[in-house]
Amino acid sequence: MRAGGGFPQAGATPALLLLAAALGAAGAPPAARAQGGVGAGADAATIAELRQQLQEMRRRDEEMRRRMEQLEALVARQSRAQPATPTRAARAPAAAPAATQADVQAAQAAARDARAAADQAQSIQQNMARAALPPAAGAAPAERDVPGLQPPEPMGDQTATGDALRSDLPGIAFRVPGTETQVRLYGFAKLSAWTDANGRNQTDAPLPGGIPLTGSPAAQQGGDFGMTARFSRFGVDTRSLTGWGTLETRLEGDFGGGSPTSSNAVFRLRQAWGELGDERFRVLVGQANSLWNEGVYETLIDATNLNQSFVRQAQLRLTARLAPGLTGQISVEAPETQYTSAAGVFTPGSTLDGGASPAFNAAPDLLARLNYRKDGLEFGLRGMLRQLQIRPAGTAAAQPFSGTTSATGVGAAAHLRFPMRWFSESFGADELLGQAYVGEGMGRYFAGSTNGQDALSNIGMPGLTGRVSLDPVPAWGFTAGYRRFWTPQIRSNLTYSYSRQDFASYALAFAPGSASATSLNREIQQLFANIIWSPFGQVRNGVFGSGWLDIGFEYLYTRRDLYGGAAAAGAGQAGHGIANRFLFATVARF
């Protein structure tokens, strides 16, 4: 009967339902799709609605499997049985017909269950495709839905800094008539205003490792006030159903390419990539967020904050589902060697005395990532392997130095997002957040901590000859935070971060007060506290969706301490800097 199509394979129905629950798209009410689409939040919010149905389907599938096993065992016994004599068959003439009738009844019941389960699974799949994108106004239902189209993978919150890996937003979507393609327009308009209580720092995206030192001219001037809308964002996302799965493309940019002090914002490319595959395996090529990226905590400021990473670069990425809730990724990404010497900070695109830079890119960066998600819990591991290189030949550093010098950069990091409702439902959507990292030669992935420094070099120091040195900077750090929901519309974030870098001892000979000496931060600390109002925010089953609008206030404390202290800072300056910034921001999404 199985060969004839009456019985599905055991386990087929639960697999379809687990897929539906994992994507969490079936049965989402229109209001939730219109206002609560917060990446993982909008999808996860509907999982609870499927749980009861999933449990019932599992029970029915187990019952069907049990009946099938009984039926197969009975048929096998009957096929093996041979009547010993006509007398025995005559003594029990009704036994075989009774068994045959029970057989038929069991088969009929199992077939009915199988057909009902298959119909329900198909309905769930159709609902998943239907809920993947919000409907376009005025579009006919037949033009909105592409059955079987894989929706964008939800990763990260819909917040200013919660787009570390994918930056999915709900957007405005429609189906291209006559095609198997859906187009989504998304983005936000953002206004930020801030004032500093200490040194003057006119950028709207200050790096923690670059705040003014105490006693510096900027500190003597005092803090000023600024406003900007240049980080407003716009993106176009397409998804097309193919024989190899969903083909998704994305073009995204903002207006943050110009000067922070100018009102003439310059558009810049953030992401440009295509990805092909399904929930089991996907391949991405183009410029995208690095696999090392992780925002973890929510802030209103647009800077790369302490221990955060928001690197976007060209890459080839493979993504696979390894187990329920567990995703594995590897990528080959564009490199950039950056070193600091007595002559300054250099990348391959810099110049040395009017000529080429000794910093050299010899091989791509290799990165890997594991992410586990279950019912609001998220745990991630990341690793990287890099090659750093200096080639003095053909540059102003060729004499007295010679030869190529290479070094290895390695790093590992982990993060945790823990739902407090696991302790008690009274916590609602509150989250406990944590992150830690350790490694060396990975400064470009932690620009907030190290201003991008991967290594130090003795290039430019007097009296040195022979092979140029290249010493990767060891670094480690951690972040701990708490996200508190006072109401579904009002939330706060409190976060503390610490980082430490160790440098080669010859850096103490860098000229006091020079850019090289004052860029070497031994320790950095940062504290965030904010309150954000999302009038259309929703919390469903412990999962938060911010909706279309955020309005918030934020306080930011930063302190950095130089390697070498006051001796490295120069005359009149302390060996540390302190910044207190107060920020207001509003984000209106579409």
Image (tube, helix red, strand yellow):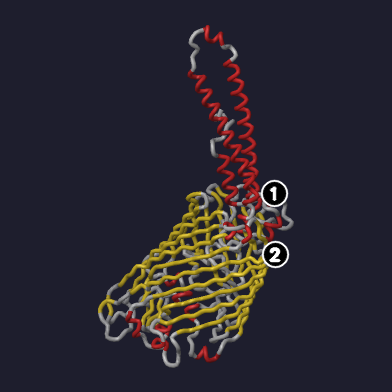
Of mark 2 and mark 1, the one earlier in the sequence is: 1
Please tell me which residue is depicted at 68% across the width and 66% down the height of the picture: 489
Describe residue 516's horizontal placement relative to residue 302 as left or right. Answer: left
Check the picture and name the quadrant holding the N terminus. top right
Dot 2 crowding, Cα within 10 Å, few <14, some 14–19, many 20+: some
Task: Check disc 2 and give the amino acid type.
Answer: Phe
- Quarter holding residue 183: bottom right
**Res 65 visible:** yes
Which residue, as the protein is rendered here, is positioned at the far left? 466
On the image, the x and y values in percent for residue 112 come to 64, 32
**Res 396 visible:** no
Please tell me which residue is depicted at 49% across the width and 14% down the height of the picture: 82
Q: From the image, tell me which residue sits under label 2.
A: 536
On the image, the x and y values in percent for residue 221 come to 55, 91
Please tell me which residue is depicted at 46% across the width and 84% down the height of the picture: 576
The numbered dot on residue 341 is none
Q: From the image, tell me which residue sits under label 1.
A: 142
263, 75: nearer the viewer: 75
Above or below, 439 against 195 in this view is: above
On the image, the x and y values in percent for residue 332 come to 43, 61
Above or below, 513 against 404 in this view is: below
Task: Check disc 1 and give the amino acid type.
Answer: Ala
10, 127: nearer the viewer: 10
SS state under label 1: helix
SS state under label 2: loop
540, 334: nearer the viewer: 540
